[in-house]
Image (cartoon, rainbow, N blue to C red):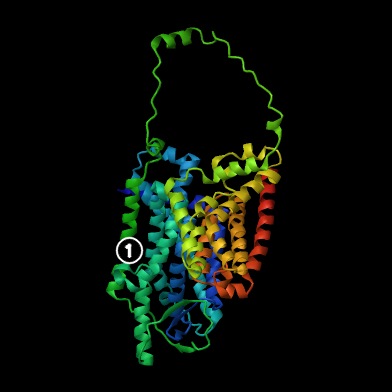
Amino acid sequence: MNAQARVLWHLMRADFLERVRRYSFLMTLGLALYLGYVVSVGQLKLWVDDSRGIYNSPWVGVVMALVINSFLSIAGFYVVKGSVERDRRTGVGQILATTPMSKPLYTLGKMASNLAVLLSMVAVLAVMAFVAQLVVGEDTHLQAGKLLAPLVVFCLPVMAIVAAFAVLFETIPFLCGGFGNVVWFFLWIGLMPASIFGGQALDLIGMGAISSDLYRQTALRYGATKHSFTLGAMADESRNKVFHWDGMDWTPEILLSRLVWIAAAVGLALVAAFFFDRFDTAQGSGRVRKLKVVSPGALAEAAAFPAALPAPAVHLHPLAQGARRFSFFGLLRAELRLLLKGQRWWWYAVALGLFIATLAAPLATVHKVILPLAWLWPILLWSGLGTREARHGTSGLVFSAARPLGRQFPAAWLSGVLLAVATGGGAVARFALADDWTAVGAWAVGALFIPTLALTLGVWSGTGKLFEIIFLVFWYLGPMQRVPPLDYLGAVPAALKAGMPLAYLAATGLLMVAATVGRKRQLARM
C-alpha cells in the first residue's frame, strides 16, 4: 500500500511540475487574478433579495467561493483536460504502459494532478479574497478561519469533481476531443439550477446551502424574504440594504454532503480506469491487421541473395501544361472537402433539419433560437481552421507549397465562411423576404466573424480548444441569454441599437489581420 501511495505521489508530482513550467499555467493564474480583481472592485456582487452583507471575512469568503465554483469550474476543466493525450502524444504513456502501474492508479494520479493545478488557482483567489476585504474597506478586521472555511468546504469538492471529469472525458473515445468540450459546457450549465433547486443531493456548487442560510438571515432581519439570489455584475441603485453576517452555520448535513462529493470524484476517476486503454493503440482501431504469411522458400532465397534483384526503374513524366496552372476554386473545393471530411450522414441530417426549421419557424424564433443553434452545430468543424496543419503534422507539406499565405490561407478561411452560409442560408432568405435588411447585415457579419475567430485562435493557439471555449461563451451569453455586448448575430434589439454588428465587423477585420500575422510567423519558422 505504501508503494502504491509513493507511485501515486510521484505520478501526481511529476505531472504537476510539468504543467507549471508551461506558459498556459501562467495564463491560468492570470485568469484567477482577474476573477479576484473583479470581486475586489465590486464588479461581481452577491445579492439576497435587495440586500447584501457587509464585506467582512465571512461574506468575502462566501462570495469568492461562489465565484470560484461558478466560473473557475468551467474554465478549469479546459485547463486541466489534455494530460492523458499529452502522455499519448509524447510517448510517455507507452513507457508507463511497460511498468507494473495499474490503470486505476494512473487515473487516480491524473485526477490528483488535475486537482493540484485547480487548487493552485483556488489558492491565488484565497489570497485575493483577503485583498478584496481590505480594498473594499467596509470591515478590515481579517478572520482567516471564517474567510477560508467556505473556500475549503465548498470549493474543494467542486475542483475534485472537475478534475475527475477531465480524466473521465479523456478516457472515453467520443468525449476526448472537441465534442467532450461542448458536452462539458452544457453539463456545467445544468449544474447551476440543479445546485439551487435539487436539494442537498445535487448541490455541487453550494448555492443551495448558502442561499438557504442567507434566506434565514434576511428573514430574521427584514421579516420576510423573496427568495431572490443573485451573483453577478448588476448595478441596481434600489438594492441598497446592507446587513452584518457572521458566517455559515456549518451543519453536519452540509459537511457530510461535501464529503460525498469528494468520494464521488474518486469514484469517477476509478470509472475512468475502466475505459482507459492503457495506451494500447490496437484497441482503438477496432480491427486486427492480418499479417502476410511468407513461405520458408522465399525467406531462404531473400537471405541468400539479398541484392539479387535490381531496384525497379522509375520513370517520371512531366506534368501537363494545364496541370501547372493554379486554380483557386480547385483549392477551395479541396479545403471544403477537408473541412467536411469524416462527417456521418446524421450530421448532415441535423444540419438539414435546422435549415428547414429556419424556413418554417416564426421569424422571431429564427432570429433568437434557430439561427444560433444552426451556427452552433458546425462548431467542431470550424475549430479545425488554422489547426489542421499542426494537428496532422502537415505543416512542412502545406507551407512549402507556392504562396501558402496568398492561396491556401484565404481558401481555408473562405471554406469556413461558405459553411456558415450553407448552414444559415435559410435564415438570411427569411430576413430578405421580410425586408429586414438590418437583420441581413447582422447575419452577414456573423457569417464572417465566426470562421475568422476560429481561424485566428487556431493559428495562434495551435488547437481548436480555445475557439470552442470562447465561442460557446459568446453563444450562450450573447444570442441565448441576450447580453448585448456578446451578441454577434444581432438577435438582441439592444445590440442592434448599440451598433454591435458594426463593432463585430471591425473585430472581424482585426482578427483577420491577427490571423495573417500569425500565419506569417509560422511560415518564418519553416
**Front residue of 269 and 141:** 269
176 up-or-down from 320: above or below: below
Q: Specify whether residue 1 is in view.
A: yes
Q: Nearer the viewer, residue 307 or 266?
A: 307
**Lateral position of residue 36 relative to residue 108, left or right:** right
Query: Is residue 164 shown above or below 504?
Result: above
Lateral position of residue 362 relative to residue 193, left or right: right
* Quadrant of the drawing holding the C terminus: top right
Label 1 environment density (alpha carbons within 10 Å; few <14, some 14–19, many ≥20) = many
Q: In this view, does 320 lie above or below 33?
A: above
Residue type, numbered disc 1: Trp
Residue 30 point in image, percent of width and height: 56, 63
Q: Can residue 117 be seen in this view?
A: no
Residue 128 rendering spot, x and y as whole percentages: 52, 71
Residue at the limit of the structure toward the front, as seen here? 433
In the foreground, 340 or 304: 340
Q: Residue at x 68, y 31 (%)?
A: 323
> What residue is disc 1 on?
261
Specify whether 332 is left or right of 472: right
